[in-house]
Image (cartoon, rainbow, N blue to C red):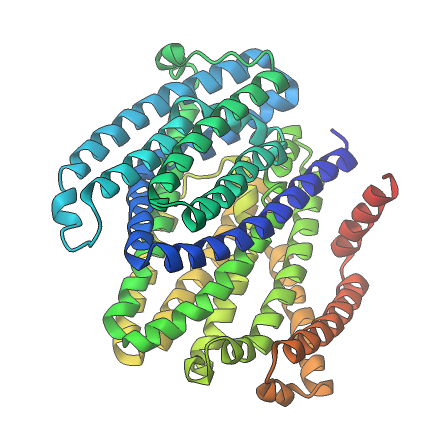
Amino acid sequence: MSEVSRTAKSLKNAKIGLVFYFINLILQFFSRKVFLECLGAELLGLSTTAQNLIGFLNLAELGIGGAIAFTLYKPLYEKNVQVVNEVVSVQGWLYRRVAYCVIIGACILMCFFPLIFEKANVPLWYTYGSFIVLLISALLGYFINYRQIVLTADQKEYMITWNLQGGRAVKVFLQILAIYYLDNGYVYWMILELVVSVAMAVALDKLLKRTYPWLKSIPSKGGKLRKKYPEIIQKTKQVFFHQIAGVVLTQTSPLIIYAYASLTLVAIYGNYMLIILGVISLMNSLFNGINASVGNLVAEGDMERIKSVFWEFTSIKMWFASIICFGIYTLGHSFISLWVGKEFILEETAFQFLVIIAFINLTRTSQVFLSAFGLFQDIWAPLTEAILNLGLSILLGYYYGLTGILFGVLISLLLMVCCWKPVFLFKKGFKTSLNEYIWRYAKYVILILISWLAISLFLDLSSLDIITSYRTFCWIAFKYLSIYVILSLVLFACFDKSFRLSIARMKLLFGNR
C-alpha cells in the first residue's frame, strides 16, 4: 500500500471522527440539561449507574479486540481471505463465551437490584428496564457486530463511525425530543435506546456484508480453529493485563482523592478533569484512525520505513499536544473563573502536575507501535504502573493532599510510559539502540519549552486574570494560541526533519484532491 493511500485513509478516519466528536459532544450537553430539567437528577443518576454496571460486566471482553486486530493486520495486507475468516471465527467463538459470562453476571446482579437501589426514588421496574435495554445493546456487539474489527484493522474506521456515532447522534436527538415533549419520557428513552441499537446492529451487519461479501465467520468452528492460532489466546491474555491495569487506575484513583480531599476540592478537581478529558477525547478522535495504518505498515516489514513513520507520528503528536497543553495552562484558570467562579480555581502546583500528566497521556506514541508489533508480553509493566500509581498516590496524598496524589500519578507515568515503553519498543520492535529516542525526545521537549518561554516573555499573561466575558476570553485565546501555533510550527519545521516530512505528506495528500 502506498504511503499516500495509507495517509489518506488515516486522514479520512480522523475527519469523520472529529465531526462526530463535536456533534455528540453538543448533543450530550443538551441531553444532560433536558434530562435534569424534565426528569430530575434521580433518573439521570439511574441511567448513569446502569451504564456503569454494564461497563463493569464488559470487563470480561478486555484483550480480545486488541489481539484480534493485531492478528488481522498481516492477512488483510496479504489479502488472505481464508485466514481472515478463520481469525474472525475464533473471535466470534470467544465473544460467545464472553456474552454468556455477561448474561450470567447480569442475572446475578439483577437479583440485588432491590438492595442496590433501595434508596432511589424511582420505580423499581425503571431500574430493571434501563439495565436490560443497555444489556441487550451490549450483547448485540458480541453476537452480531463483532466482525466490525475487520473494518478497524483494514483502516476503514470511518465506516464504523458513520454507522455507530451517526446512529447514536440520531438516538440522542430523538431521546431529547421524547423527554421534552412526551409524557413518561423516560419510558420512551428506554424504547428508543433499544430500537435504535437494534437498527444500528442490522445496518452495520449489512454494511459488512456489502463491503466484504467474502467475510463468512463461523463461530461454532472457532473452538477448533483457536488451536491453529494459539497467538490469539496468548495475546488476549497479555492485552487483558494491560487493559485491566488501565481500568484499575482510572476507577480507583478518584477514590483516593475522595478519601483525602474535601468535597469542595473534589469538585474543583472534577471541573479541570472535565476540560482535560474533553481535549484528550478530541486528540483521540484525530489520531485513533492512524492505529490501523501503523498495523498495516508493520505488516509490510520495512523497518526503516516503520521507524521513519514512528518519528513523523511522534513529532506531529508532540506538536499537537504542546498546543493543547499550552492552551490549558495559560487559559485554564481564566475559563474556570468565567464558568464556575474564582473560588473553584485549582492550586498552582497541582494544576502544573495535571498539565504534565495530560501531556504524557496525549503523547503515548510508543503504545500504538507496540500494539502494531503485538508486543504485549511485558505484563509486569502495567501491573507495576498500577501499584506505583496507587501506592505513591496513597502515600504522598496522605502528606500533601491533591498535589501529592497527582505527583504519585506523575512518577508512575514517567517511569513506565516515558522510560520503559520506549525501551521495550526499541529493543523488541525496532531492535535498535535507545540513544536516538533519548536525544530526539529531548529535542522536542526543548523546542516546546522555547516556544512557551518566548510566549511568556513577549505576551502579557497577567491580562488573563482580568478576563470578564466569554467574548474577551475567545479573542485572547485565539490570539495567544495563534501566536503559539505559528512560533512552534516554525521551530519544529526548522529543527526536525520528521516533522517536515509529515507536513509535506499532508500537502501532497491535499494537493492530489
Side of 316 relative to 373 (left or right): right
Q: In which quarter of the image is residue 137?
A: top left
Q: Count the numbered circles shown.
A: 0
Residue in view at x 23 percent, y 34 percent: 106
Side of 472 relative to 407 (left or right): right
Q: In this view, does 379 lie above or below 435?
A: above
Q: In the image, residue 441 lies at what x, y percent?
A: 62, 61
In the rendered image, the quadrant that contains the N terminus is top right
Of residues 291 and 57, which is closer to you in this image?
57
Q: In the image, residue 21 lies at what x, y percent?
A: 58, 49
Q: Is residue 45 above or below residue 344?
A: above
Q: In the image, residue 455 lies at what x, y percent?
A: 70, 80
Q: Can residue 407 be seen in this view?
A: no
Of residues 373 and 2, which is closer to you in this image?
2
Q: Is residue 429 above or below residue 327?
A: above
Of residues 57 and 319, which is closer to you in this image?
57
In the rendered image, the quadrant that contains the C terminus is top right
Q: Quadrant of residue 331?
A: bottom right
Q: In the image, residue 78 lies at what x, y percent?
A: 65, 19
Residue in view at x 32 percent, y 77 percent: 264
Q: Is residue 97 visible?
A: yes
Residue in view at x 77 percent, y 71 percent: 487
Q: Residue furthest right?
A: 511
Side of 78 relative to 27 (left or right): right
Side of 385 relative to 478 (left or right): left
Of residues 105 and 64, which is closer to you in this image?
105
Q: Quadrant of residue 273?
A: bottom left
Residue in view at x 48 percent, y 19 percent: 87
